[in-house]
Amino acid sequence: MDNRRRIVMINKKFQMTLIAKFLAVNIMVLLIFGVLLYMFLNSELEANLYSAHVTYHNIKEMLFPIVITLSALNIFISSTFITIFVLYASFRIAGPLYRFDAAIKEINQGNLSPLLVLREKDELCACSESLQDMTKSLISMTEKGRSISTDLQSINESLKNDQLAEKINEINSILNGIKYKK
């Protein structure tokens, strides 16, 4: 059985919006190309129609350099527009990913209260909220662990068990390595 995905749609709304924007940029570039081609051909044909038979043997010879020039111009303009568009669109993804990476590194170092603020129009805002919920949950578990550790210390004061005291100290040293704002 083939388990590979046929269509990768992780965030349908974002992906469809990005596809629509790419198509809009492509259509805009093609319209610009069409207008330039029309204007250039119109001016060339009007100006040189009477003298064209002297220089060119047929209309193909006259149109070939024009089409090549405008095609090269179209490639340059479309590449520039699409590069700028992709760079701008990627900011809304790359910025949050950079912030997530920094926040996860802080959490890995024991800091459960990293500042993870995304701009309103950034993608991955739901992931940011999930990460904030996760850190709140970890803080809650840490508080519960500290409470249990305190209870165990109280119980061990009456038992005076050295092994238990050693394990409680190990738990406390682990819990003390976790930092967060209350």
Image (spheres, rainbow, N blue to C red):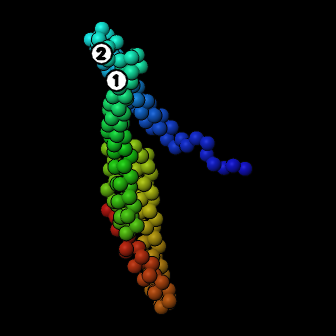
Direction from residue 159 to residue 122 in the image, left or right: left
Graded by Cα atoms within 10 Å as few (under 14), some (14 to 19) or many (20 or more), the crowding at tag 2 reads some
In the displayed image of the protein, which residue is found farthest to the top?
Answer: 50
Residue drawn at (45%, 57%), measured in percent from left and top? Answer: 134
Q: Position of residue 74 (x, y in %)?
A: 35, 30
- Position of the C terminus, as image quadrant, is bottom left
In the displayed image of the protein, which residue is found farthest to the right?
Answer: 1
Residue 60 figure quarter:
top left
Count the numbered circles shown: 2
Which callout, 2 or 1, points at the residue further toward the start of the chain? Answer: 2
In the image, what residue type sits under mark 1? Ile
Direction from residue 5 to residue 79 in the image, left or right: left
Residue bearing the label numbered 1: 66
How far apart are labels 2 and 1 at the CA level? 9 Å
Q: Position of residue 59 (x, y in %)?
A: 40, 16
Residue drawn at (49%, 41%), measured in percent from left and top? Answer: 11
Along the viewing direction, whichever of 133 and 75 lies nearer the viewer: 75
Q: Position of residue 140 (x, y in %)?
A: 43, 62
- Tell me whether circle 2 and circle 1 mark residues in contact (CB < 8 Å): yes
Q: Is residue 170 above or below residue 119?
A: below
Residue 27 figure quarter:
top left
In the image, what residue type sits under mark 2? Glu
Along the viewing direction, whichever of 165 and 123 lies nearer the viewer: 123
Give SS at disc 2: helix
Q: Is residue 151 visible?
A: yes
Q: Is residue 120 visible?
A: no
Give SS at disc 1: helix
Which of the labelled discs sits on residue 44, or is there none? 2
Residue drawn at (66%, 49%), measured in percent from left and top? Answer: 3
Residue drawn at (32%, 62%), measured in percent from left and top? Answer: 181
Residue 153 figure quarter:
bottom left
Which of the labelled discs sits on residue 50, or is there none? none
